[in-house]
Amino acid sequence: MFRLPDGTLRFSPRDLIAYLEGDFSAWCDRMDAERVRADPAVAPAPGWFRADPKDAELDLVARKGLEHEGRFLARVKAGEPGLVELAQGDSATADTLAAMRAGAPVIFQGHLAVGAWHGYPDFLFRTPGPSALGDYHYVAWDTKLARSARPYFLVQLCAYADLLETIQRVRPAELVFVLGNEDELHFETVHYFAYYRQIRRSFLGFQKTWSPDCIPHPGFDRSWGRWSDAAEQRLDETDHLSRVARISRAQIRRLGEVGIATLRHLAETDVAGVPSIKAPIFDRLRLQARLQYRSTEGAPPLWELVPPPPNEPRRGLVLLPPPSPLDVFFDMEGFPFARDGGLEYLFGASVPQGEAPAFRDWWAHDDAGEQRAFEGFIDWVMERRKRDPDLHVYHYASYEVTAVKRLAGKYATREAEVDDLLRGDVFVDLYAVVR
């Protein structure tokens, strides 16, 4: 968002997406726009107010996104020599309208602006159907590096459809994405437009009541966009209850209703219970807060063995199987932007061997190497399992198992072996044990 010369704000679909992150992120974006304006009526930004530093991985994603957009542009140009490619600048809006009125088959990087809203759809494709432009109208297409659709993609394309509807007097019937694997996904606008309008109304209401002195607390948001460092600092400074592991936002609100607003207060409280929070859950939250509060930074965290509740006997350490001397601790590393489809470039396994564990690794630099590494790892595990059918392969979270299943299907190899490991519950997810 930014201020126009007349002092009014102009918003973009990106601002709507930031608003979906939460009120804290939206407040910070607005404060950032007001600081550029240097209005003396706006209070100075707080000391914690700063956007996250540049991230090399995010920069790489941006570059790969532009490369994907460039490849699709070249493909469209080959089929549509009349494609109009526009440059950003003061005349971009007028140039876009001129190209639309002239009936250009495709417009690349057009600029749509209506009232307080504007946006830059990657492509505008001409499609048959009457509109204020003639016997045709335009549909926005966007290139996305992701390999599956995400909800905020639809919000962004609905915003473009809204702008197009005002300009051409007809709403595009579909929203189209070109994903990183070149798949084209078409969604019917009618199924998502009401949701977009609701978000838009809520966003405009937030902007209307925005105040530099009324800062939303980040503890109630799921994520903070480009303001993560600022949010973390705020959470630490206020000792917010969201720092308690496995606490929910509803529980935070219920604790706040009885005056418990910080991790320390929860850790030290001697109240017997809290309305609307079951006693076992309250006791668990209080114990968790106490352990976190008493743990010293830099030292191993304090812990306490808690027996599983009667209604959840299979929980925590009980999920661990008996140990085997041939157990494997498995980790994989992948790079999603290597070639088309990414590359699982490292299979790593640590195994008990005397006082110090031994490490095995299988590396890959291309598809053939990825297949060899996958087969080598699976064959190695199966050979160990022949020696001890009770061994297990420990991993953390779902990445490894998901990748193993995908590679078995991708290369049509070791499918029976992977199926045997899965059916035998050989893989043990440590995240499910410790969360």
Image (cartoon, helix red, strand yellow):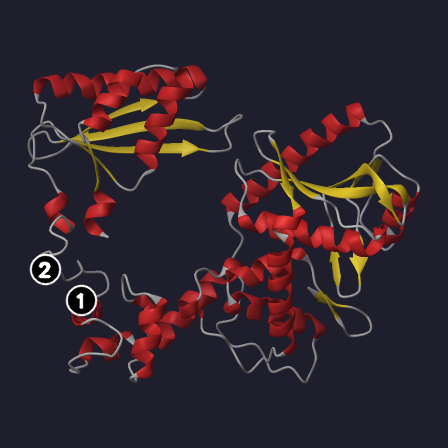
Q: Position of residue 219 (x, y in %)?
A: 40, 69
Q: Position of residue 115 (x, y in %)?
A: 80, 65
Could you say which quadrant of the image residue 417 lies in? top left
**Quick check: can you spot residue 346?**
no
Q: Amino acid at mark 1?
A: Arg
Which residue is at 20% across, 21% downward? Answer: 381
User: Residue 432, relative to residue 404: is it above or below?
Assistant: below
Which residue is at 91% across, 47% downward? Answer: 98
Which residue is at 48% across, 72% downward? Answer: 48
Mark 2–mark 1 Cα distance, whole angstroms, equals 9 Å
Within 10 Å of disc 2 (Cα), the crowding (few <14, some 14-19, many 20+) is few
Which residue is at 61% across, 79% downward? Answer: 209
Label 2 SS: loop
Q: Which mark is residue 306?
A: 2
| In the image: residue 416, left or right of residue 363 | left
Label 1 SS: helix
Q: Which image quadrant: the N terminus?
A: bottom right
Q: Which mark is residue 231?
A: none
**Which residue is nearer to you in this view: 136 or 231?**
136
Q: Amino acid at mark 2?
A: Val
| In the image: residue 353, left or right of residue 334 | left
Q: Position of residue 374 (x, y in %)?
A: 32, 20
Give the residue at mark 1: 284
User: Residue 39, relative to residue 92: is it above or below?
Assistant: below
Residues at badges 2 and 1 in contact (C-beta under 8 Å)? Answer: yes
